Image: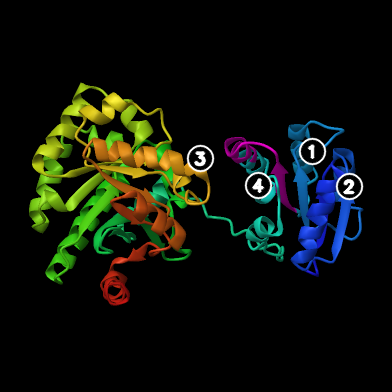
Amino acid sequence: MQHLHFLVAEADPIQRRALVDALAQLGATRVTEVPDAPAVLRTLQAGFAPKVDVAIVDLALGGMDAMELLRAVAALESSVRLIVTGDQPAGVLFSVETLVQAHGVDLLGTVAKPVNSGKLKVLLDNYQPPGRPQPQLDTPSFSFAEVGVGLQKRQFEPFFQPKIELATGQVKGLETFARWRHPEHGVLGPSAFIGALEQHKRIDFLDWTMIELSVERCRRFHDQGIPISISLNLAPATLAHPNFVRQIGSCMKRHGVLPDYLTFEMTESAILDFDVDFIERLVRLRMMGFGLAIDDYGTGRSNLQLLARIPFSELKIDRSFVDGASKKRPLGTVLKSCLGLAHSLDRMSVAVGVETRQDWDFLQSLGCTYAQGYHIANPMEAGAFPGWLEDWRHFF
C-alpha cells in the first residue's frame, strides 16, 4: 500500500477527508485529493507525476456528468485501477460497474456510501500491479481444405472437462471440447478451425468426428470401470440432417454404449429457430434415452413455453451469471431465478464457469445440481482423466 499513489475524487470535503483517513489506516502514504471531475482527468493524464495507481471516484462529482466522466477516463487509456463510490442503490452501482468494464477500464469494484477502511480493503485486495505487456500469440488460421485434411488424418480429438454433483462432490459427467493436435502448431482450440467450417456450412464434419471419438472414449472409460456420461455440443444443422437419428443409433450400437450416457447440448439462441421436424427429432432423441441440454442459458431470447414443451433434461446456466454471483446481488438474483426455473420444470441445472471456491459454495447453498469450471479442472485429454478422477476422489 505504501508504494501506491492514490487519487481521491470527492466533492464533499468531509467525506473526502474520511476517505483519505481510511486509506491511511490501510497503510497508504501517497494520496492526491481532487474535488471535481475536470481535476480527475487532469490528474490521470499521461504527463501527471507520480502516476496514479488507484483512483477512488465518486459518482456525484461536479463539473461533468458521471457517465461522461467514466467515458472520458476510458478514453485516456490509463493503467489506473478504478474504485467507484456513490450514494446509489446496489442495482445502480452494479449497472455502473458493468458500464465501466464495457468501456475497458480496469475496475476494482464499486462501493456504496458510507465508505470505510474495511470496504476499501476488500476491493484493494484485488489489486495486481501492471505487469509487462505479454506478447500476443496469434492463433493461426486455416483454410477449409486444411481443416478437412486434419479431420481425415484423425488429428482432432476430444478433451474432457468434469461435471461435478454439488450435493455429493461426485463426478457425474464429462463435457467434450474439440481440440486439433496439429503437427506444427501443437494443440489448437476451436478459434483456429471453427470459422472455416462454419463458412462452408460443414460444421457437421467436426460434430460427427467428436461424436464418434467421444462415444469411443466413453466405451473405454466404461471398460476401465468408470461408468461416466459424456455431453457434447451439437449444431442444429447437424441434428437437422434426415439421417441423424439413424446414424447416432448406429454409432451407439457400434461402441456398445447406451443412449443414457450421451447428452447433446444446443445453445438457447439456436433452439429458438425451430420447426416441427426439429422438435420431432428432439423428442425422438429423448424417447431413445439421450439427454438434451440447453447451453448458455440466459443469453438468448428466453422462451419459457419452449422450455416447458421440449423435453430438455438440463439447463446449463451461462458463466456470465455464475462468475461473481456470490458477491454481486443482481447476478445472484438472476442465478437464483434460473435455478428455480430448472427445479420447477424438473430439469437438472448445470452452472458453467465456476472459477472459485466461493462460487462453488454459493451454488451449493442454492441447490444447483452440477458445476463445472476451472475451479474443478481444465479440459484434459482422455488419457489424463482416470488419474485425475482418482486424485479427486482422494481429495474430496
What's the residue type where badge 4 is placed?
Thr
**Mark 3 vs mark 1: in front:** 3
Residue 95 belongs to magenta span:
yes
Question: Which label belongs to residue 311?
Answer: none
Q: Position of residue 231 (x, y in %)?
A: 26, 51
List the residue tagged with mark 3: 330
Pick whichever, 160 or 214, lies toward us: 160
**Mark 4 or 3, nearer chain start:** 4
Q: Splitting the image into 4 quarters, where does residue 339 fall?
A: top left
> Is residue 226 rendered to the left or right of residue 358?
left
| Label 4 – label 2 distance at C-alpha | 19 Å
Amino acid type at circle 2 is Val
Q: Earlier in the sequence, mark 3 or mark 2?
A: 2
Towards the viewer: 102 or 61:
61
Quadrant of image for the N terminus? bottom right
Residue 193 left/right relative to 51: left
Q: Is residue 129 left or right of residue 204?
A: right
- Kindly identify which numbered label has been placed on residue 72: 1
For disc 2, the neighbor class at 10 Å (few under 14, some 14 to 19, many from 20) is: some
* Mark 1 or mark 4, earlier in chain: 1
Residue wearing tag 2: 34
Q: Nearer the viewer, residue 226 or 346?
A: 346
Q: In this view of the protein, which residue sits in the foreground, 89 or 328?
A: 89
Could you tell me how far apart the alpha carbons at marks 4 and 3 are, in whole angstroms? Answer: 13 Å
Q: Does dot 2 land on a helix, a strand or a loop?
A: strand
Q: Secondary structure at mark 4?
A: strand
Q: How is the image coloured?
A: rainbow
Residue holding disc 4: 110
Spot occupied by residue 119 in the image (x, y as percentages of width and height): 65, 55
